[in-house]
Amino acid sequence: MQLRAMTKQDVPAGLRLKDLAGWNQTAGDWNRFLDASPEGCFVAEENGLVCGTATTISYDNRFAWIGMVLVDPEHRKRGIGTQLLKRTIEYLDQRKIPTMKLDATPQGRPLYKKLGFVNEYEIERWILKRPLGTDTRTTKSGLEPLTEAQLGFIFRVDQEVFGADRSFLLRSLYDETPEFAMSDWRDDNAPLGYAFGRRGSFADHLGPWTADGKDSAEKLLGEFLARTSRETLVVDCLKSNAVAIELLRAYGFVFSRSLTRMYRGPNPHAGNPASLCAIVGPEFG
């Protein structure tokens, strides 16, 4: 078994592993990782078969995200996931990125703790399943498509929310699914809240989703529901955001699983999670 850098020729192998795990990512998501970090994504390979993956993305060189730690079920319990995780840490240390973050499942958290990660806050995945083509609302809220100037404003605001510039990621989400990019604006043309989304392999995923209050949060959530006709919808919500969880429950979402945001190293750029309803996803932060 050897570790090597992942290339775009490995995307089909990555899709096979995420399908085995029942995850929602698409080829477009794998390409987002490779475009953002062409030297920082890795595969474990044995006899020509890719049996494991791990990805990294650096945000402003302030912190980096580790994600997509996947191992073929037939190759588990051999330490492959641990070796891949250590390789990502080694790579990010070599790049002198001071902070590493990830969103851990309960099963993965003990391993991450052994490698120096500590808890930051809790995240909950909520899922809505509905008959195909179901309309949850009769009318949309009237939110207009975003202009380039508005996108630029949102990208700047998002730096304060997230803790670093991730405009390249939000731009990629917008370019792929502009219908899920929306914002609720105040009279002074500042956003009360904004949201993006993406189409996964089996579900549409809302995130990031931010709002300063319940009215704005509900307007954005309702608009997302009105703009998608998929049977399954996914939101990774901050457990501390009682308003967002109340809205998800009211719209028929049910709790699916818990995640823990963890970090290794200092954490001077924690952003402003108080205004965050939902993250992009555990693979992106």
Image: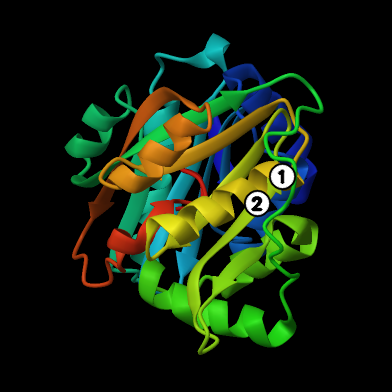
> What residue is shown at x 58% (from left), y 74% (from top)?
167
Residue at 25% over, 45% down: 240
Q: Residue 129, image x and y in percent?
A: 63, 21
Looking at the image, which residue is at 36% across and 32% down? Answer: 82
* Residue 60 shows in this picture: no
Q: Where is residue 130 in the image (x, y as percent from the top left)?
A: 68, 21
Q: In which quarter of the image is the N terminus?
A: top right
Residue 14: percent from the left, percent from the top? 68, 34
Q: Is residue 29 above or below residue 270?
A: above
**275 displayed left or right of 264:** right
Q: Quadrant of residue 45?
A: top right
Residue 146 visible in this rendered orientation of the protein: yes
Horizontally, residue 132 falls left or right of residue 181, namely: right
Tell me the residue at 58%/62% (across/down).
37
Which numbered tag is attached to residue 285?
none
The residue pinned by badge 2 equals 223
Left or right: 163 with respect to 186?
Answer: left
Q: Which amino acid does label 1 sit on?
A: Ala
- In this rendering, the answer to whether 9 lies above or below 191 is above
The residue lying furthest to the top in this view is: 74
Tell me if label 1 and label 2 are in contact, CB under 8 Å: yes
- Judge by depth and name the residue closer to the eye, 75 or 266: 266
Determine whether, in the image, residue 192 is placed left or right of residue 43: left
Q: What residue type is labelled 2?
A: Glu
- Residue marked by disc 1: 226
